[in-house]
Amino acid sequence: MKESKDVYLVDHVRTPFSRANPLDPDDDVFSKKQGLEFVAHVLIDMFDNRIPNSGSSLKREDVSEVLVGSALLQHEHGTFGGRIPIFMAKFPFHVPATVFDRQDGSGMTTLHVGFANISMGYSDVVASVGFDQFTRVPLHTYGGKVTVYGIPPDKFMLDPENKWYNDDLYDWKTSRLLYQAAQKLAEEEADNISKDDMDEFSIRSYNLAEKSLENGYFKEEIMSLKGHEGGNPENEIEIRADQSINKGVTLESIAKMPSISTPGWAGGYKNPVISKDAYVTRFGTEEGIITAGNSSPLSDGASLCLLASKNALDEYKLKPISKIISIGYAGVDPTVQGRGIVPAAQMALKHANLKSEDIDFWEINESFSVVAINAANKLGIDWENKMNIHGGALAIGNPISATGLRITTTLARILKEKNAKYGLAAMSCGGGQGTAVVIENLD
Amino acid sequence: MKIRDVYITDYIRTPFSRSRPREPPRDVLGNLRPDEMTALTINEMFDNRLKDKVKPEDVDEFYIGATHFNFEYVTFGGRYPLFLSKFPPKVSSVALDRQCGSGMTCASLGYNNIALGYSDIVIASGQNNATISRNPNRRPTTREIPPAMKPGHELFVDDVVDFRCSYSMLQTAQKLHEMNADVFSKEDNDRFSVRSHKLAAKAQEDGFFKDEIVPIMGHREGDEDEPMLIEYDTSVRKNATYEGTKDLRGLSTPGWAGGYYRPLMTKEEYVETFGTEQGLITAGNSCPTNAGTATLMLMSEEAMKKYDLDPLARIISNGFGAVDPTVMGRGPVPASWMALKHAGLTTDDIDCWEINEAFAIVGLNWIHEMGLDDRMDDINIKGGAIAIGHPIAATGPRIVGTLARILKERKQKYGLATMCCGGGQGTAMIIENTDA
């Protein structure tokens, strides 16, 4: 019987993450950049700058396949099976492509698929790219204004007269509005996580990201990309840093931010898990506890991870950063989608033959504070010292499909920096899923 | 880590109806959403075919392929069709697009994850319904010209990619035919198409497709208010003849008339070779557009034993490759060679072949490039997409499933199914009949 092959993470690059704003597009420094341009630019930067500068002989024509992930493949994100962005990046015609949607996990799924194809011996070099552009192709609902690019089967599954009605089971309003899913998760975890915990966790993320930004930590992973400043597309400048990292945020300012979610007792989701009285007693407020302060801002951008087999390392003189040990994926109740991290991480640990305590550093995506804290609690992570030590999506921003590859990249860099061995990156996905990957520092 | 064996344990599909985006009532399945059709087949699979053996909650992963994700095709990461199919939330899902190869790619990824030990049971589906939600011609429906097509833009590539040709499958087939001017005539194409209709009609008469088709409640052609159970593929023409096919109007534009960049032949050469000024691609020698879904169930050996199921086939290898998008029909060639290489087999080892008939010329070109000109009796023996129809992403699972059933029927061992993909790709899969 054949043996599977080892898979290595050999390089990475990402765009800066801008702050998305579909209601006032020019406010986003990348409002003029289409999502597929992000993909082309990270590929171009990788093959025109990073690879040649690294001393590797790898060229575009040596790539076995390019895999692209996005949560929103509607509208101008139509990729023609992944081909358009790789044509724009001047790849030769013989390089295949595929495009994936697993919502937030789309980017990490490209890593999973690349890992599997290399393990199986079908590919040698895979470029995994995740992108999203929420200013130009927004989520179904944004800022209370519905901006639909596509007709999700709402009426279909929401109409009790329709034979496909299943809203009793899936509570689509909650499943689709991720801040409601976070609110429900917070209520289910009311005994373990308070609003203060959530806000304090956010401040930690802001502080760590701010420090990393000041230290120039992100420079190594970010390419510069043309955008504009001052809300005026005419004022072209090179954007070199993430745009969401706010300086000088305090716990007081975060704690005072207005609620964006509705509690279960007030009809925020079906079958409330705690009564109004219990809610007020626990959280000290009648209002929802998810705010802009303890949820990640939507951002635009793309990330790329380059994977290679052992053969390719030798043939193209590529230097591995990490070895990919295992992957994990799982589904959970979509009304509490944030729980998806836990079974996905457990699956990856099981296949790596490791336990939580063997993991030296974690990157757990901070789509919401409550999601990250809950995952840390359930997985037994010493989060203050070992998790998201350079900040997370709460501060850096969340161009959701790009995030999976960003956290994998950051994790690989952290393992190097700390001279540690094992790392696990995981994230939850809208619709109730989780994706995870375990990597090993080869030094 | 040891690579495990992976088996196909079930295959099911809807009938394929002819799409009528301009006259929706004429498509007998035109009122059904694609995810609804996927759910109908999967519900049938679990409620009846696998009753009391495997349950939806035993499944690890669900892959759904489609050629775009606009309108009714929004899947929320595969969750909508997953939940409609009554899988519980713990089953994970992915939606993917490799154009025509989307469905076969779903099966390839399921195969990978089972082989590597990450999953035990995977459902791979492809779906399409061009009537209910017009495929926006596969191009991005953008508010402005995409950078790739905007002259002067730093990412402009239209001079190389020739999007007008690449996006129009008809044009890619025309160009492919002109490339093959010395090898194939238009008559070869038309005769290949008639063969497809005849073989499919024979298979229909013999009841071959009954075991793979779930009858679905649609409506009478032209009357949406009159429900009718649809049990057969509606594009198959029993009475197709070469005489009736050869004079159909050319739908494509030849290179000399501007049909694609950098024409391969002058007008004079073209007329001399083909005996006409017209395009060579007609409704007769190309596949129709169809609505339908097809689903494969994949399992590890352990799972198959645990749930007491018999294999339809074992998956030996898969292949994928890419080519110039202006002649996307060549995609099956590199994909097939890759699958053969990984299987350690030669073309002589393969007993039976399924090449997707997106266009007759795609089938003929592949047969010629693979050196299979004398193997016609082993190729698409139950007809192909020209007759059965091509609900794009559903065709991959269909040809793999049909091939598995043909191998059983002919008691042969190895089969290879392959297809071209818009955008210039190909996918392939080699399967083995474990009884032979």
Image: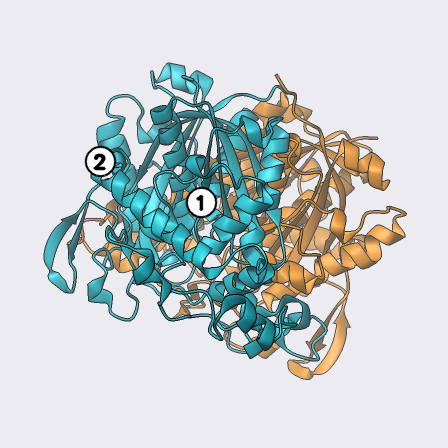
For label 2, the crowd category at 10 Å Cα-Cα, with few meaning under 14, some 14 to 19 and many 20 or more, is few
Colour chain A appears in: orange
Q: Nearer the viewer, residue B357 or A307?
A: B357
Q: Is residue A252 left or right of residue A280?
A: right
Residue that numbered label 2 is attached to: B207
When the figure is inspected, residue A202 is found, relative to residue A389, above or below; the finding is below
Q: Earlier in the sequence, mark 1 or mark 2?
A: 1
Q: Quadrant of residue B243?
A: bottom left
Quadrant holding the N terminus of chain B: top right
**Chain of the residue under label 1:** B
The residue type indicated by label 2 comes to Gly
Q: Nearer the viewer, mark 1 or mark 2?
A: 2
- Same-chain status of marks 1 and 2: yes
The label number, if any, that marks residue B103 in the structure image: 1
Chain ID for cyan: B
The residue type indicated by label 1 comes to Gly
What residue occupies the far left of the structure in this picture? B226
